[in-house]
Image: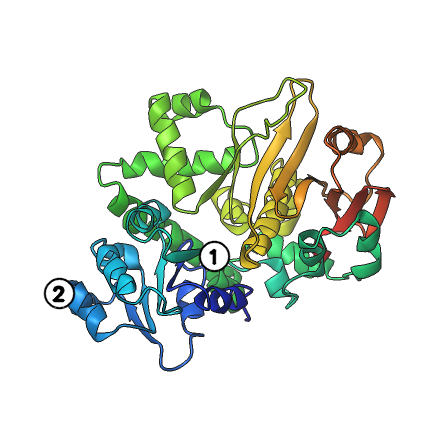
Amino acid sequence: MERSYKPLLFELLAHFPCVAIIGPRQCGKTTLLGTLPVPWRIHDLENLSDYQVISRDPDLFFRLNPERIAIDEAQRFPELFAALRVAIDRDRGCRGRFVITGSSSPELLRSVGESLAGRVAIIEMAPFSFAEIRHKIPPMFLTLLANRAPAGVYPLQIEPCHQLPLQHDFWFRGGYPEPWIKNNSRFHALWMNNYIGTYLFRDVARLFPGLNANRFRSFMQILAGVSGQVINYAEVARALGVSQPTARDYFQIAHGTFLWRQVPPYTRDAVKRIVKHPKGHLRDTGLLHYLLRIPDLDVLLAHPIMGRSFEALVIEEIIRGLNAMGIGFDYYYYRTGGGAEIDLILEGEFGLVPVEIKYAKGVGKRQLRSLSDFVRERSCRIGIVINNEERVRLYDENIVGVPFACI
C-alpha cells in the first residue's frame, strides 16, 4: 500500500539533516522506513542488540555512522538526542543524514525541542486514510484547497467517486494497517483488544509510571462515549472519581499519545459569544466502534454515536491528508452561545476555510446558515460541506458540497 507520506519524507530529507516521524503505534512508521533505499540502515531501539550497540556510546556510534541512519522508536533512549545534535553539528550543511521515529509524542517532542530545534523536520503520521485505501494520493480535493481554488472550480475538477460501500467499510473498521490488510473480522477484534492492552501497559505505563492503569482503562471507555462532544472536565472527573486536574491530565495523555485529538475553539475576531471549551474525538473510528462494542455497520448506522463518528472520520481524513502534503495549518471548531456551529475551521497557507460535515446526502439551506454567516462575516474565499452526495455541487457562489468519497 503506497503511503501518502513517502514523497514528503524524501522532500524533507533534501532540506534537513534529520527527519522525525511521529505517530501512534502500528500506523506504519517502520514500514515507511523500509522504503529508504540502500545504503540506508535501520536500527530498532526495541531490539535489544540494536539498543546495546547505540546506548553503549551514542557519540561513538554517530562518528562511525555519520549518515543514512534510521533509528526506530527513538524515544526509548532519551540520551540519543543530545548525541544526535552533536553529530548533526559536525557537518551542519549536509542534508538527509538521519531519520528517527517515535510513538509517544510528549517524550519525543520534548527531546526534539530541547536538543534538535532547527535541525529536524517533523512528520506526524497516522493510520491509513481513505485516499490511501483507494490509491488517490494526494486527492484532488486537497490539491484544490491547497492551491486556493475558488468554489466554482471544484465541480469541474473533482470527478464523481462511486465507492460508497468501500467508504462505509473503511469508516466502520478504521485505518490501522494490519487489521485492514488482513481483512478478517475475528482478527480485527483480537487485534483491537491487544492494541488497547499494549497502549495501556507499554506506552502509558512507561511514560507515566504513577498512573492508575485500571482507572485509565475506565477513562478510555468514557473517551469513546464523549467522542465528538465539547468536553466537560467536571463531569468526566465525577464519573471517574478523580479531581478535575487529574481528568485534564488524562485528556492530555490521550492526546499526546495519539489516541485522542483535542480540537480547540475558534475564538479569533469573535463578534458573538463563543463557546470556549475544547472539543475532541478518538482519532480512529475503528477503535471508537470497538470500545463502544458496535459489532457491524448496521448497528453503527442506528447508533447515537453515528453522526459524531462520521464527523471524526471526515476531520481526520482532512488533517491526515494535509499533514501528508506538508502543508502548514491549524484546526478549530466553532460554536456560539446562540447555537450556531461549524464542525471544522481550517486556517493555514490556503487561508481561512470553514467546513461543515453532514452524513446525509441532501443539505437544506437552513442547515447551511451557520456556514454562510461565517463565510460572509469573515470574507472567506470558500466554505465547504462534506456529505454523501453523488457528485460535487455548488450551493452558492462561495459554498461547495463535496462527497466524502472524493476527499
Name the N-terminal-most of marks 1 and 2: 2
Q: Is residue 231 above or below residue 205?
A: above
Q: In which quarter of the image is the N terminus?
A: bottom right
Residue placed most toward the observer, 346 or 159: 346
Local SS, label 2: helix
Q: Where is residue 242 in the image (x, y as percent from the top left)?
A: 33, 24
Q: Could you tell me which residue is drawn at 56 percent across and 31 percent down?
A: 229
- Residue 286 disc label: none
Residue at the farthest left position: 56
Hey, which quadrant is residue 165 in on the image? Answer: bottom right
User: Is 212 rendered above or below residue 117?
Assistant: above
Residue 360, position in %: x, y? 76, 43
Q: Position of residue 243 (x, y in %)?
A: 34, 21
Q: How crowded is mark 2: few (under 14 residues within 10 Å), some or many (20 or more)?
A: few
Q: Is residue 135 left or right of residue 36?
A: right
Query: Horizontally, is 63 left or right of 185 in the view?
Result: left
Colouring scheme, one of rainbow, by chain, secondary structure, one colour: rainbow
Task: Tell which tag, 1 or 2, sits nearer the viewer.
Answer: 2
* Secondary structure type for disc 1: loop
Q: Which mark is residue 56?
A: 2
Which residue lies most toward the bottom here?
A: 38
Residue at 39 percent of width and 23 percent of height: 237
Q: Is residue 257 above or below residue 339?
A: below
Type of amino acid at the residue the image marks with label 1: Met
| Residue pictured at 29% horizontal, 49% vertical | 111
Q: In which quarter of the image is residue 110?
A: top left
The residue identified by callout 1 is 125
The quadrant of the picture occupied by the C terminus is: bottom right
Q: Position of residue 184 (x, y in %)?
A: 52, 65
Q: What residue type is labelled 2?
A: Arg
